[in-house]
């Protein structure tokens, strides 16, 4: 591990540029001894080499090709825009079709009955990309449709080459690229303005993380590699790159890496145990069903476990870095404090962090599954019935396993940080802060 040199001192023994009345620095962590750096390097260098070997061995070399099915996301799409829009009587365009039985009492019959009432929108759509750029077709939008079109709007259209000529194109979604790009730009600007250089490095680390995800993790899983092994190697690579890039190559960052690694191992073990015990298949909706149909060799339960590990990584990084920084700052404020005192003080900070982050995790998953929970509420299902459903059980296991790893990361990282920082033996003549004395410095 590298370390910064101690700042030069003036004639009175104070570092240049620091007020005499300030007890400790809020800048980069104080350097640790050469011996301690060797101990940390002895653990992390073999781990980093193992990650590199894993990347080399499992590197997929691209996403495997397949014959498009035309189902869901596996369709050919092009960009288009609405060039004209007129209101027409829904009956005249046969917007709703009565079920073959003629019964309009079921939900589908009621929907067909409503769709024949009122005015429908007849949209003229022009394809703006692809080989058939300039081709137009019409799309009928019912008055109660959740997505309404307007003239000049950009849309995404699906192309079905095997369908009859007049039915080859259909609108599948609205083109949201401009607002999404603008929002991403605002986010990046806010991060840079507040975080400055660290903010820039955080954005670079974010790009690298997405690169590892899209160039390694996803193609490797599609190539048939074990999803759990791919997730472990990919997550470890993301963790090493993101933490060291954002927080620097230091002993403090290395302790956060070790704490994150221990917690990820715990999450992997617990996830593997309970996903198998609860017989969770990972194949619970149309999207996972499509993946399994296209690539039947993919272990869907392993894919679920890989998602648990990757999803937990981001929150773990936050907790471990915060806890390590807290212990380092406590030591800077009072170098006489031993490992037990540092641990007790650090764990008090960690308890507040746990309470807020665990609640955040649960609410995040609940918010994502809100439509599903509404369906169960409409059906007046009991809590036990809802929890036993595989769709909900997956989210429960994902949330609880991730939360257990998150909770465990606090004492583990705090203990590691307390042991490392208190066991440090700086070189002779090194100076450090002590408590009291109007910020006067003395030798350790």
Image (spheres, rainbow, N blue to C red):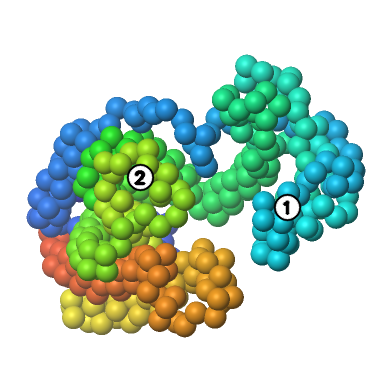
Residue 294 versus residue 252 in the image, above or below:
above
Residue 433 is at least partly visible in this image? no
Residue 54 versus residue 285 in the image, above or below:
above
Sequence-first disc among 2 and 1: 1
Towards the viewer: 10 or 295: 295
Q: Report which residue position mark 2 lands on.
A: 292
In this rendering, position of residue 437 left or right of residue 420: right
Q: Give the residue at x 10% y 55%.
A: 39
Label 2 close to label 1 by CB (< 8 Å): no
The image quarter in which residue 127 lies: top right
The image quarter in which residue 296 lies: top left
Position in image of residue 210 (x %, y %): 41, 42
Position in image of residue 297 (x %, y %): 26, 41
Residue 351 versus residue 83 in the image, above or below:
below
Towards the viewer: 389 or 4: 389
In this rendering, position of residue 45 left or right of residue 381: left
Q: Pick out the residue farthest to the front.
A: 101
């Amino acid at each position: 591990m590298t370390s910064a040199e101690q700042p030069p001192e003036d004639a009175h023994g104070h570092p240049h540029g620091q007020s005499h009345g300030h007890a400790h620095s809020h800048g980069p962590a104080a350097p640790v001894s050469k011996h301690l750096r060797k101990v940390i390097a002895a653990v992390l260098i073999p781990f980093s080499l193992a990650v590199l070997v894993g990347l080399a061995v499992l590197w997929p070399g691209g996403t495997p090709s397949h014959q498009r099915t035309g189902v869901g996301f596996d369709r050919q799409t092009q960009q288009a825009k609405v060039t004209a829009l007129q209101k027409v009587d829904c009956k005249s365009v046969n917007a709703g079709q009565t079920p073959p039985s003629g019964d309009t009492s079921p939900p589908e019959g009621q929907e067909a009955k409503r769709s024949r009432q009122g005015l429908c929108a007849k949209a003229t759509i022009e394809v703006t990309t692809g080989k058939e750029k300039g081709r137009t077709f019409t799309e009928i939008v019912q008055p109660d449709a959740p997505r309404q079109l307007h003239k000049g709007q950009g849309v995404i259209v699906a192309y079905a080459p095997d369908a009859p000529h007049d039915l080859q194109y259909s609108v599948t979604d609205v083109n949201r690229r401009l607002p999404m790009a603008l929002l991403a730009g605002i986010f990046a600007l806010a991060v840079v303005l507040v975080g400055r250089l660290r903010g820039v490095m955080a954005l670079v680390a974010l790009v690298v993380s997405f690169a590892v995800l899209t160039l390694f993790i996803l193609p490797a899983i599609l190539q048939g590699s074990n999803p759990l092994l791919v997730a472990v190697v990919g997550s470890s690579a993301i963790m090493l790159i993101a933490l060291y890039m954002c927080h620097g190559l230091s002993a403090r960052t290395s302790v956060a890496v070790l704490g994150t690694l221990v917690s990820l191992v715990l999450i992997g073990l617990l996830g593997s145990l309970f996903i198998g015990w609860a017989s969770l298949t990972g194949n619970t909706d149309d999207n996972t069903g499509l993946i399994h149909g296209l690539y039947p060799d993919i272990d869907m339960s392993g894919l679920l476990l890989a998602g648990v590990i990757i999803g937990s990584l981001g929150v773990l990084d936050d907790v471990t870095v915060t806890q390590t920084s807290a212990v380092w700052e406590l030591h800077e404020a009072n170098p006489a404090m031993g490992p037990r005192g540092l641990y007790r003080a650090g764990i008090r900070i960690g308890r507040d962090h746990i309470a807020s982050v665990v609640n955040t995790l649960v609410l995040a998953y609940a918010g994502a599954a809100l439509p599903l929970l509404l369906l169960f509420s409409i059906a007046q299902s009991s809590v036990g019935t809802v929890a036993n459903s595989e769709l909900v059980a997956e989210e429960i296991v994902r949330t609880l396993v991730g939360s257990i790893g998150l909770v465990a990361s606090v004492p583990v990282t705090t203990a590691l940080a307390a042991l490392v920082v208190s066991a440090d033996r700086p070189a002779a003549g090194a100076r450090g802060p002590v408590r009291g004395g109007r910020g006067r410095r003395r030798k350790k």
